[in-house]
Image (cartoon, rainbow, N blue to C red):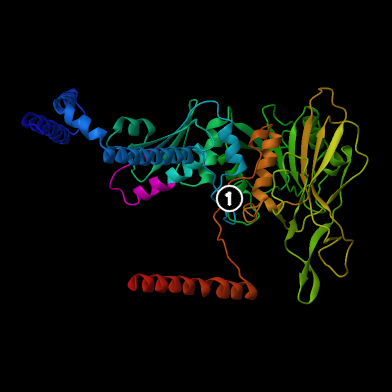
Amino acid sequence: MERMSKILLSLAGISVLGFVITRFLVGVWIPFLWIPIGLFFVFVFAALYRERKSVTVFLSMKTTKHGMNMGALIGLVFVVLVVANFLSIRHYKVWDFSGSHINTLSDQSIKLVKSLKGDLWVRFFYKKGTEGVDEQRKQFRDLLKKYQDQSASIKLEFIELNERPDLAEKFGVTKGSGSVFLEYQGQRNRIEKIDEQDVTNALVKVTREKDKIVYFIGGHGEKSLEDSREGDGINALKLMLENNRYVVKPLALNLNAKIPEDADAAVMIGPNQRLLDYEIQGLEDYLRRGGSLFVALKSRQTQGFEKVLSTLGIVPMNNYVLNLVETPAGTGIQQGQTIATVFSSSSEITKVFDKNGALVFRNPMSFRRQNTPEGVSIDDLVKVPESSMSFESLDIKDNGPQGSYTLAMLAKGKFPGSTTGKEFNLIVIGETEFLGNQLLGQILNRDLVLNSMAFLSKEENLISVTPKENQVTKLILTDSMFYLFVFLFAIPLPLFLLGTSVTLWMKRRHA
């Protein structure tokens, strides 16, 4: 190589070194950095031009051609790997083997995400150095990735408070322990807990066009909306509805028998005093106007509402439905809780329920149909399995009739005598304590309530099973399965690997 070529290559190296040192000292990109980059290419090309004859001879050598072929093959493999990784990142499949499918978004979350008509901005505010914030960021990034896999409209932004004090002030963030805001088409909601339940609830709030108003009928000894201490209180129900952006309002029906016009739905839970005739008339007028009503009644305490039900061809049986269970002593009657596992496959409310799901009631009563009027359709929403019995009282002395009894019904259509042409919706359930603070969170109880409210308020797109909660996944091995695992895998596999290693070592030693 000529001396001048060596000088040119040295200058090219100095240009690269100058670029690196300048970039490190300045810390940001500046237009001046184009100069050492340009000088590098000029010096390299000049050196190659001066050594063009040597380069030509080098490229024509047989060893060079073989080396270039090998380099081309390595380059091709590298390109294939890059493309494969790119495709695997953009298009991948996840299998969830957890017992409660905690690693998979619920149907409700997926429906909400896919219904987005614009960008949903998710902003995570944090402060560097705050204890545990890095782990929170990782957990939230992993959680939101599940949502982003369903829609490209979800945008995630991490904001450090000291770097963007203007945004921190705008959103009212003062703590750096991790605050999250969802913003969609002018609606904004804040969440504190990093889990799917809270993210989806916030998503419901920011995507709903307007708040839905639900009136809770009172004046007859119904449960108080503020009762949070007793197990059968319904404060948890109120909080759950408000968290899903329902506006909950009390309504004393004995003082004002007309359901307000702005009611998206009305709820009556376990009246303990008999409804007067004008109150029943007010409820029927509401249904004739196309209203939506959710009613939960106790056995033998229908309090006059059976008049409304009889108009629709529904008869409350005023019984007690209990499950039969198999015990070591034989078949017995399970008192205290009744499990319902049969759901309507045609109703939007229950057809999304898993076949292995269940509802938990406490001594419910059943309903039956009788002379359904024209223009009204009735669906059996919830039933107990065939291994259930009906009793006239809880003082059980003898076996009762066995069968699959209906605990919840949905009636809809044109209410008899209506002149508006609007269709009503009525859900009646033969038990009240499943709505209480103690049982509301059990298995599918919460889902039945939320799906019913979504249906009654004409928001069918929100009907689905709510996000799952963490559960322990247990691996249970029978004795035969354990011995099979030990003698086919636990013992033979290490012995096989040990034998293979010793054989290879012996062959290499005597080679």
Q: Residue at x 65, y 46 (%)?
A: 447
Counting the numbered discs, the total is 1
Note whether residue 70 is visible: yes
Q: Is residue 145 above or below residue 510?
A: above
Highlighted magenta segment, given as a residue range: 124-139
Question: Which residue is farthest right?
Answer: 371
Q: Amino acid at mark 1?
A: Lys
Please tell me in which quadrant of the rendered image residue 304 appears.
Answer: top right
Quadrant of the snapshot with the N terminus? top left
Q: Is residue 141 left or right of residue 333?
A: left
Please tell me in which quadrant of the rendered image residue 404 appears.
Answer: bottom right
Mark 1, residue position: 468
Q: Secondary structure at mark 1?
A: loop
Q: Position of residue 461 (x, y in %)?
A: 65, 34
Q: Position of residue 489 (x, y in %)?
A: 54, 71
Few, some or many residues within 10 Å of mark 1 (<14, 14–19, 20+): some
Q: Position of residue 289 (x, y in %)?
A: 78, 27
Q: Is residue 375 left or right of residue 510?
A: right
Q: Is residue 370 magenta?
A: no
Q: Is residue 91 left or right of residue 169?
A: right
Q: Residue at x 76, y 65 (%)?
A: 335
Quadrant of the snapshot with the C terminus? bottom left
In the image shown, does 445 or 121 lie closer to the viewer? 121
